[in-house]
Image: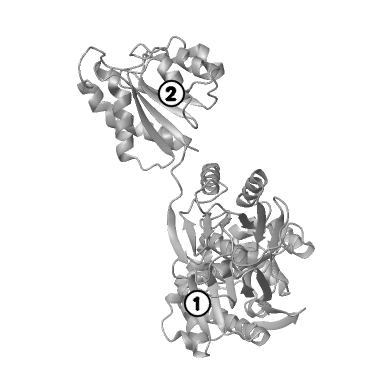
């Protein structure tokens, strides 16, 4: 959309020139490619009506106007068909009847929105240039005009990272990303552009900006997207918006599973066409009614195969359990067959009713979705050591506290005791089972600082050992010795460095994120790479293809 900003006025009548001055300054300072500033000096009603007909879209008329307000103040309002009658007494200070001019343009066929940015004058005496008080007010009025323009047309999306591609994409793709940490990506031939993060798309303002930016990219120049990429979860706002935009424009939609997109983002960074992937995070929709987040994948463009994961455990209350790690610890003990210690409940101030409710949810699957996620294991272990808050205030808080505790350990971390876990296979899927860990620590216990540091370090080394075992399984299945690592867990230095060292010692090639973070901001890049780099067989308009792991 092109927005025209027109400055009206006369330079020989004092403050009547304020519209011209504001738009002149706008043309010199504002970097808004979709805004066209024009100066229509000494225009009469007939000239204004004629010139409006030449404009391609909406217009803001910036003019000095008698509005009965305090001098130097401004007002922004739409001048639409049903509002014109209310403004027929509003007279442009150079004798132009604003309502009459707009009514004439409407009758001649101009049907775009018309807005007035009116400024109340100080003095209109015949004199060259603005009055001193108006010149003093000009910067504040200019800021108000710029804010008004940005409200109508937000600034264009800013490119944060360019990712050059070793192999060109087969098609241009607009990827909508994920909800919690949203960022758009655009794939165009030999590079993927990741745009500035927009924040949580659950926020109404972020949703508005996301839609504005997506529409701007869809209306772009040579790289107009041919396909829109979304997350596999159908209810996330970026997915809903992607489907709506595709329907409007007759484009195909391709849904990419969350963890496959994570892996693909890291592969795109490093120019890989096929690799094993470890994707460990808090959770992501798996498409099989469970929450994934500790995934061993075999990935290439358009293809993802799930080879391994953590054994699932219920989350009593769903999101409520994510916010309260002690609910998760209770679920871990129940899953391991450990009786809940009344002393532990008393220490935490948990009532018998709460414990009974959570237990019932876990045992009967009532609002207790199954989670494979590594992030939830970090939460439960932080709760086990008594360092997790009862109500978290930020994402990943228990995991960060657990890492901080481990870094306080004094000694050779490689020599600490390993915590128990077991491996089993179900339908060719390797499962890492952590029940033995929670059986080892079955009830209420007071930990010293040294004990907390020791067992926190032991947990990190055990996590790395489990990851290595998963990679061994992946190598046995595929013969591949390249491993990409993605997901928020790899923000943990002890895990990221520890895994790299171990795998490289065994002859594996390990690839971790360099240009983009390992968290959810990378999702849109992965969606783009998975869709743009593979032959997709979609027919008709607004069809949907799914890229999800088998296994």
Front residue of 76/273: it is 273
**Which disc number belongs to residue 500?**
none
Residue pictured at 53% horizontal, 47% vertical: 210
Image location (x, y in percent) of residue 508: 53, 86
Residue 139 image offset from top left, x and y in percent: 28, 32
396 shown above or below 183: below
Q: Position of residue 265 (x, y in %)?
A: 54, 67
The residue that mark 2 highlights is: 51
Q: How many numbered circles are shown?
A: 2
**Horizontal and vertical percent position of residue 498:** 48, 81
Residue placed under numbered mark 1 in the picture: 511
Tell me where residue 332 sits by quadrant.
bottom right
Identified at 74% across, 62% down, the residue is: 289
The structure residue drawn at horizontal position 53% and vertical position 62%, both measured from the top left corner, is: 525
Relative to residue 81, is residue 292 depicted above or below? below
Q: Label 2 neighbourhood size at 10 Å, few (<14), some (14-19), many (20+)?
A: few
Q: Is residue 438 left or right of residue 388?
A: right
- Contact (Cβ within 8 Å) of mark 1 with mark 2: no
In this rendered view, identify the residue nearer to me: 293 or 207.
Answer: 207
- Alpha-carbon neighbours of circle 1 within 10 Å: few (<14), some, or many (≥20)? some
Residue 343 seen by the camera: no
The secondary element bearing badge 2 is classed as helix
> For the C terminus, which image quadrant?
bottom right
């Amino acid at each position: 959309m092109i927005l025209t900003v027109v400055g009206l006025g006369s330079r020989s009548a004092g403050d009547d020139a304020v519209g011209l001055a504001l738009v002149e300054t706008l043309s010199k300072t504002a970097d808004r490619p979709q805004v066209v500033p024009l100066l229509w000096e000494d225009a009469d009603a007939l000239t204004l009506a004629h010139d409006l007909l030449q404009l391609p879209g909406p217009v803001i008329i910036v003019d000095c106007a008698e509005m009965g307000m305090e001098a130097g103040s401004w007002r922004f309002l739409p001048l639409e068909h049903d509002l014109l009658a209310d403004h027929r007494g509003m007279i442009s200070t150079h004798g132009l009847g604003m309502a009459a001019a707009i009514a004439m343009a409407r009758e001649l066929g101009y049907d775009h929105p018309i807005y007035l940015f009116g400024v109340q004058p100080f003095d209109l005496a015949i004199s060259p240039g603005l009055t001193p008080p108006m010149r003093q007010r000009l910067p504040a009025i200019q800021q108000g005009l710029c804010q008004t323009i940005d409200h109508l047309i937000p600034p264009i999306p800013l490119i944060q990272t360019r990712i050059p591609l070793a192999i060109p994409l087969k098609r241009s793709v607009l990827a909508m990303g994920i909800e919690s940490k949203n960022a758009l990506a655009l794939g165009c031939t030999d590079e993927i552009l990741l745009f500035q993060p927009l924040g949580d798309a659950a926020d109404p303002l972020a949703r508005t900006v996301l839609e504005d930016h997506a529409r701007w990219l869809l209306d772009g120049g040579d790289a107009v997207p041919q396909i829109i990429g979304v997350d596999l979860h159908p209810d996330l706002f970026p997915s809903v918006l992607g489907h709506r935009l595709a329907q409007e424009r007759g484009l195909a939609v391709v849904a990419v599973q969350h963890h496959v997109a994570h892996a693909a983002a890291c592969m795109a960074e490093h120019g890989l066409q096929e690799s094993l992937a470890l994707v460990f995070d808090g959770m992501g929709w798996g498409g099989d009614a469970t929450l994934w987040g500790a995934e061993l994948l075999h990935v290439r463009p358009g293809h993802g195969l799930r080879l391994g994961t953590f054994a699932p455990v219920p989350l009593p209350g769903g999101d409520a359990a994510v916010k309260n790690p002690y609910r998760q610890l209770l679920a871990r003990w129940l899953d391991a067959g450990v009786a809940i210690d009344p002393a532990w409940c008393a220490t935490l101030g948990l009532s018998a009713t709460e414990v009974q409710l959570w237990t019932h949810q876990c045992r009967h699957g009532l609002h207790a979705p199954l989670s494979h996620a590594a992030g939830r294991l970090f939460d439960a272990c932080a709760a086990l050591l008594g360092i997790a808050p009862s109500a978290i205030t930020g994402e990943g808080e228990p995991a960060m506290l657990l890492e901080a505790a481990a870094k306080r350990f004094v000694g050779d971390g490689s020599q600490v005791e390993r915590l128990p876990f077991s491996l089993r296979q179900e339908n060719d899927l390797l499962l890492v089972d952590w029940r033995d860990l929670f059986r080892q620590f079955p009830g209420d216990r007071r930990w010293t600082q040294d004990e907390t540091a020791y067992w926190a370090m032991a947990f990190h080394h055990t996590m790395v050992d489990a990851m290595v075992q998963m990679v061994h399984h992946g190598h046995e299945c595929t013969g591949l010795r390249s491993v990409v690592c993605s997901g928020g867990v790899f923000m943990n230095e002890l895990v990221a460095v520890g895994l790299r060292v171990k795998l490289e010692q065994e002859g594996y090639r390990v690839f971790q994120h360099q240009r983009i973070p390992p968290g959810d901001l990378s999702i849109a890049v992965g969606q783009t790479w998975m869709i743009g780099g593979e032959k997709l067989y979609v027919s008709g308009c607004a069809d949907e293809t799914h890229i999800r792991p088998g296994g």
